[in-house]
Image: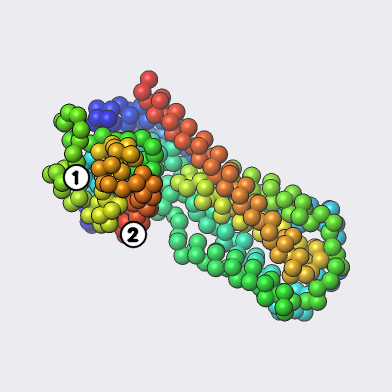
């Protein structure tokens, strides 16, 4: 029996118990899922602040949707459908997220052409995105730039930034959904 | 947010955990909604007026008429199924979505082709005075009840669920008008099929409204954990 299969059985059992009101099983399940979701997102997006927000929002969504899990079915497709949905919703939302690097810097943030950019670019999703989409998402969603700041930095109009953000998120959704 | 906050969140979510009744089926609720909606449409339609004379015989005598009715029925059922699939995370099948849209296009194509080659002789026999209004009357309640059933689960994309359910709910009266109102492909396209677009928009609006409610509910969960 593989580790993934063991995880499936354990999570399925815990969720079944949680549906019956077992607090300890549910706490153990959420604890483990929190780490799994964080690892899943870190591989795909790199170390950005948005990840912890997404982990917590995913846990809340799992809590709200726990009655929809069918214990006769696989747990992962149900779980990652929720996680992908929360991540795309967070990327779409108007909130800006400050990167870990920004916290260390004072004043203006130069993210493009820095080691931070290299690190994020290595992540699965950002590596698969076209450079035009990657740059705008990096600036607006990771570094917390406003649309006009991003437009100024990249030397393009604000409308182009908006279009690229929209298309970049659409491409991100496709990348996440194309995974088995 | 820190891991400390995640731990607090987990503690709050798991504290005083209430048992939940699993609502994870798709086929049964979808079938139930589809059948009950049909019963409602047929019963109300018969209450408001008779069937067109000879309409049921046409289903046997004209293969083209039977075909376009069958394609519509299958398409309506497929839209119902994919709407309920949207209600459960991870259960959506993209190929079924494509199949539903292709069948709907085929169904509409039947009537476009019927403008030149009608399945049966077009006539004003059986014309219902307010068939457009009746279409809204027949599809409105099933749409609202159906969306309530979907919302009781956890649709990740409420807008899409609303659109799919709107298609299915809108197709119910359009199909029944096939035998209860006059037969003329032009009339069918403008008075029976065109109103579906309004029902789809209504479904989309329900999706948007309920999506906001879902976010408020989730937000309440977050707020609750922070107090």
Relative to A95, is B87 above or below? Answer: below
- Do circles 2 and 1 both sit on a common chain? yes
**The disc numbered 2 marks a residue on which chain?**
A
Label 1 packing within 10 angstroms: few (<14), some (14-19), many (20+): some
- Between B63 and B115, which is closer to the camera in this rendering? B115
- The residue at the point 62 percent across, 61 percent down is B76
Outermost residue on the top side: it is B227
Q: Nearer the viewer, mark 2 or mark 1?
A: 1
- Asked if residue B131 shows in the view, the reply is yes
What residue lies at 55% left-to-right and 64% top-to-bottom? B101
Q: Which residue is mark 2?
A: A178
* Label 1 chain ID: A
Residue A38 makes an appearance in the image: no
Q: Is residue A21 above or below residue A92?
A: above
Crowd class of label 2 (few under 14; some 14 to 19; many from 20; radius 10 Å): few
> Gap between marks 2 and 1, in whole Å?
28 Å
Place of residue B95 in the rendered image (x, y in percent of width and height, measured from the top left): 46, 65
Relative placement, left or right, of A153 versus B209 is left
Question: In the picture shown, does residue B131 fall above or below B141?
Answer: below
Locate residue A140, reporting x and y percent: 30, 41
SS under mark 1? loop
Quadrant for residue A30, please give it: top left
Mark 1 — residue?
A: A112
Q: Nearer the viewer, residue A59 or B123?
A: B123
- Disc 2 on helix, strand or loop? loop
Residue B136 is situated, as x and y percent measured from the top left of the image, at 72, 50
Left or right: where A64 falls relative to B58? left
- Rendered-image quadrant of the N terminus of chain B: top left
For the residues bearing labels 2 and 1, Cβ distance under 8 angstroms: no
Placement of the C terminus of chain B among the 4 image quadrants: top left
């Amino acid at each position: 029996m593989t580790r993934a299969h063991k995880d499936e059985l354990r999570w399925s059992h815990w969720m079944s118990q949680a549906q019956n009101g077992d607090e300890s099983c549910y706490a153990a399940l959420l604890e483990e899922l929190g780490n799994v979701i964080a690892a899943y997102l870190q591989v795909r997006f790199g170390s950005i602040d948005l990840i912890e927000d997404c982990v917590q929002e995913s846990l809340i969504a799992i809590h709200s949707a726990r009655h929809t899990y069918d214990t006769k079915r696989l747990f992962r497709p149900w779980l990652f459908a929720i996680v992908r949905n929360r991540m795309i919703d967070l990327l779409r939302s108007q909130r800006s997220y400050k990167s870990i690097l920004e916290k260390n810097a004072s004043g203006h943030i130069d993210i493009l052409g820095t080691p931070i950019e290299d690190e994020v670019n290595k992540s699965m999703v950002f590596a698969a995105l076209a450079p035009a989409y990657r740059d705008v998402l990096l600036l607006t969603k990771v570094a917390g730039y406003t649309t006009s700041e991003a437009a100024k930095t990249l030397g393009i109009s604000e409308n182009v930034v908006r279009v690229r953000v929209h298309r970049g998120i659409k491409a991100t959704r496709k990348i996440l959904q194309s995974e088995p | 947010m820190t891991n400390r906050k995640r731990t607090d969140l987990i503690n709050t979510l798991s504290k005083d955990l209430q048992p939940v009744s699993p609502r994870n089926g798709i086929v049964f609720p979808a079938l139930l909604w589809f059948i009950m909606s049909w019963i409602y449409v047929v019963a109300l339609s018969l209450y408001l007026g008779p069937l067109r004379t000879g309409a049921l015989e046409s289903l046997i005598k004209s293969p083209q008429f039977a075909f376009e009715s069958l394609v519509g029925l299958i398409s309506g059922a497929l839209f119902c199924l994919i709407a309920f699939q949207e209600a459960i995370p991870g259960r959506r099948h993209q190929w079924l979505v494509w199949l539903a849209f292709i069948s709907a296009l085929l169904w509409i194509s039947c009537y476009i082709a019927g403008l030149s080659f009608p399945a049966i002789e077009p006539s004003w026999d059986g014309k219902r005075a307010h068939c457009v209004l009746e279409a809204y009357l027949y599809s409105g309640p099933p749409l609202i009840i159906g969306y309530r059933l979907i919302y009781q689960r956890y649709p990740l994309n409420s807008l899409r669920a609303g659109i799919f359910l709107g298609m299915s709910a809108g197709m119910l009266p359009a199909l029944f008008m096939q035998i209860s109102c006059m037969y003329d492909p032009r009339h069918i396209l403008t008075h029976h099929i065109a109103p579906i677009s309004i029902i789809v928009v209504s479904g989309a609006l329900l999706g948007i409204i309920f999506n906001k409610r879902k976010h408020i509910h989730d937000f309440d969960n977050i707020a609750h954990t922070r107090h």
